Every structure is written in C-alpha cells, then in structure tokens.
Image (tube, rainbow, N blue to C red):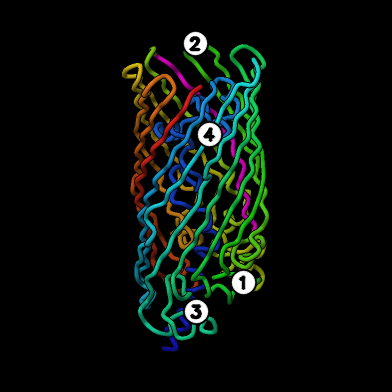
Amino acid sequence: MKHERDVSLQTLRCVLAALALRASLASEAGGGYNLLGYGPLAHQAGGTSIAMGLDGFSGASNPAKLSFVNDRLDLDLLFFSPRRTIERTGTGTPFDFSSTSNNTLFLLPEAGYARKVAQNWSVGVALYGNGGLNTEFRDDTGIPETNGNPERCGDAAGNFLLGCGKLGFDLAQIIVAPTLSWQYTEGQSFGLSALIGHQRIKVYGFQALENISAHPEAVSNRGNDDAFGAGVRLGWFGRLLPWLDIGAAYSSRMYFQKFDRYRGLIADGGGFDIPQNIALGIAIRPARDWEVGLDIQRVFWGDIRALSNGVLNSLQDPENKPFGSKDGSGFNWVDRNSYRAGASYAVTPRLTLRAGATYGKRPVADSDSNSVTLNLFAPNPEWQVTAGGTWSRDTRNQLHLAVGYYVEKEFGGASATDAIGLGGVETSRPYVITLMLGWSRKW
C-alpha cells in the first residue's frame, strides 16, 4: 500500500496540474474557451459576425456595426450540451481509469439592444456569456488510501487528480457591453464598447495540490469566488460597395480582480484576465438574396500566465514554481488564429436560412507531457458547424432557431506522469451539441 501511496503523491503533481487553470475552459470550438458567437444571427452562421449580422449584439463583436442597425431588441437562450470523458492508461497503478463529467446541459441567456439617437449616432448594450466551464467528475480509484493528501482526505480513495470526493470546476464569465457608434461619413463608422465583466469560480476535489502550492490554504473546496474587471472593444465598419462590407475590431485585455480564494491554485496568485484579440471580417452579397461572410480572429492567449505557463512548471520545480506562483503550472497555451465562415439566403421575404463553420487549432502548444494533463479538462474541439433560420412573423417580430455540432476529435498524449518516470497516456473525448432559440423586436 505504501508503494501505491508514493505513486499517488507523484501522480498527483502531474495530474492535478490539469485543473489549475481549467476554470475558463468550456469545451469551445475554434481553439479556445470563448463562445463561438454572440446573438441569434451569429449562432446561426458559425459565429461569423465582424462584417455581417446586423443586430443588437454589435458590442460583442464589432461595435461599429451598430450604426447600421435600426432600433431593436434581441433575446436568445443557448442550450449547451457537452459530453466529456477523460482517461488515463499505462501507468500500471490504480490511477489508470476513466471518468465522464456529470454535468451535460447548460442554459446561457443573452440580450442585445440597439437604438439610433441622432442622424449619425447610435447606442446600444449587449449582455452575454463570454465563456465558462462546469465539469464534475465523480469517479475515483475505488481503493482506500490512494489520495495524495491524507491530512485533508484521510483514507479516502483518490479521484482523477488524487484529491478526494467530487472533482470539478464551475466558472462563469459574463460581460455587459454598453456601446456607442458614430457614422463619420456615408457608409463608414467607428464604434466603442466598454466591457464590464464578472467572473465566478468554484473549485473542488483538488486537495492533492495543496502539497505543492504557494498558498495551500487557498487551493480547493473554498466555495464561490467572484472577480470584477473591465476593458474596451474598438471597431470599424465600412459599406464600401453595395455588395461589399468590411469590418475590423480590437478588444483589449480585460483586467480582473484576482481570485483570492484560489490564489494557491491559479498561476500569478489567482490572476485570470481575459486576453486581448483582434479580428477582421468581410461580407459579400453576390446576389440579392445571398450574403457570404468570413472572419479571421487572433487571440493572444500567451499574455495570460494562468493559460500560457507550462503544465510541468510546478511538477518539476515545486520549490521555486509552486502552484499559484507567478511561474506556477498552467495550460501551455500559445496565441492562435480562428477562422469563421457563414452564409445566409433569403428564401422568402419572411424566411432567411443561415449556416456556418468555425475552425481553430487548439491553443495548446503541443501534445507532450508539458501540455496534455492540464488540457484534458480543456478539450477544445477544432471544428464546429451550425445551421438555422429566422422567420419574420410580421414587420416587427422575428423568431430564431439554430443548432450546432462540435465535431468530435480525441485529444491526448504523454501524461505528465511521464516526466517523473511513470509513463502513462491520457486522452479526452469531447462531444458537444447546441440549440439556440431567439426572439427579436424591431421598432
């Protein structure tokens, strides 16, 4: 049994690292944790929204589009259903097992409003969930005294990260974006959104990490912790030709208060800012009833230590780089591009159909032992496809529907246990479907 306990303590250092940052990863497509798109039109068109999709959610994509949106209110509800299984094999220990997350349905409401206040000025506000995560893995080894922190867990069986009891994260990111747009010349506009954000996190089952944390009292099972932050988004939009629109947007880093209750888990003392990003978009109308759009976005994940630090940092040098420190373990993410394409077709004056797709490489730098273990909990699918439509009941009311599918693709490779001579391979298999229902009111 002593040998198994020694193995537990070793494995704990690598496997636990996996969640130190998991707080923001919601199995999103396009290479990151942000939602695919915001608002009913973007959900239908694969998230394509920098130069197409004129609704009240301009502040969530390109605030300059608001100048070309008439007075309207947009509401929608996204049903997000992920299936996530993680597995470890090849260590020859009780920690070779798999577990499937219990939480498989989340409801994400959104709201957007737009109004013209003068000939060349428009205002609006968007409320949306930027991203988030809720995982809960209940499986354990089934063998007493296999946890990595007997002082906290007694003789309990170890969970996937060698803690005890349920293992999981619950993170939600919500942003309110009041927006102002100015049409400075015919067909062209500038826009500005203030980004006011709130994050809430809850972490449990990470007791094993306390042994290699800078703040062992602030690692796991501390209840909810809240943080507020802010940033800005700038945009430009141009209707350069009757059949051609171009847009560009820049979102600054959103600076947040640190998660004090989990400062011993999340790198940089609980710092979890939202990274800056830049995006370009084009929309073409090749025929009267058709519109086709393309977006390219780059997210600077590498700016955030909790995301960019390597998984092995705290495992290989717990004395100088413990969890929660400036150089503590993270997800080993790098800056990535994502690509979105969407199309809409007005079948009749009352019915418009839309479809789209998104592609983005996983932001993880590689699939070796410095990356895999943490990213089991952030299994970002690379492809997502969506389809849907808008039906106008009358001149003022519209109903929206969209379905989405995150193309399943296994992610895995050498476990962090390999770095301490135990070998082992870990894999994750994400599967996600979405359903969006929306309503719009025009004035």
Sooner in the amino-acid sequence: mark 2 or mark 1: 1
**At x 47% / y 64%, what residue is drawn?**
168
Does 120 appear above or below 390?
above
In the rendered image, residue 285 lying in the magenta stretch gets the answer yes
Kindly identify the amino acid type of the residue bearing the numbered disc 4: Gly
| Dot 4 crowding, Cα within 10 Å, few <14, some 14–19, many 20+ | many
Sooner in the amino-acid sequence: mark 4 or mark 2: 4
From the viewer's perspective, is 342 left or right of 217?
left
Kindly identify the amino acid type of the residue bearing the numbered disc 1: Ser
Q: Which residue is mark 1?
A: 213
Distance, label 3 to label 1, CA atoms, is 13 Å
Sooner in the amino-acid sequence: mark 2 or mark 3: 3
x and y, in percent, of residue 391 in the image: 35, 26
In the rendered image, residue 327 lying in the magenta stretch gets the answer no
- Residue at disc 1, secondary structure: loop
Sooner in the amino-acid sequence: mark 3 or mark 1: 3
Magenta-colored span:
271-286
Distance, label 2 to label 1, CA atoms, is 59 Å
Q: Residue furthest left?
A: 347
From the viewer's perspective, is 270 left or right of 143?
right
* Count of numbered labels shown in the rendering: 4
| Foreground disc of the pair 4, 2 | 4
| Dot 3 crowding, Cα within 10 Å, few <14, some 14–19, many 20+ | many
Kindly identify the amino acid type of the residue bearing the numbered disc 3: Gly
Q: Which residue is mark 3?
A: 148
Distance, label 4 to label 3, CA atoms, is 47 Å
Q: Which residue is mark 2?
A: 242
Sooner in the amino-acid sequence: mark 4 or mark 3: 4
**At x 42% / y 73%, what residue is drawn?**
159
Does 52 appear above or below 100?
above
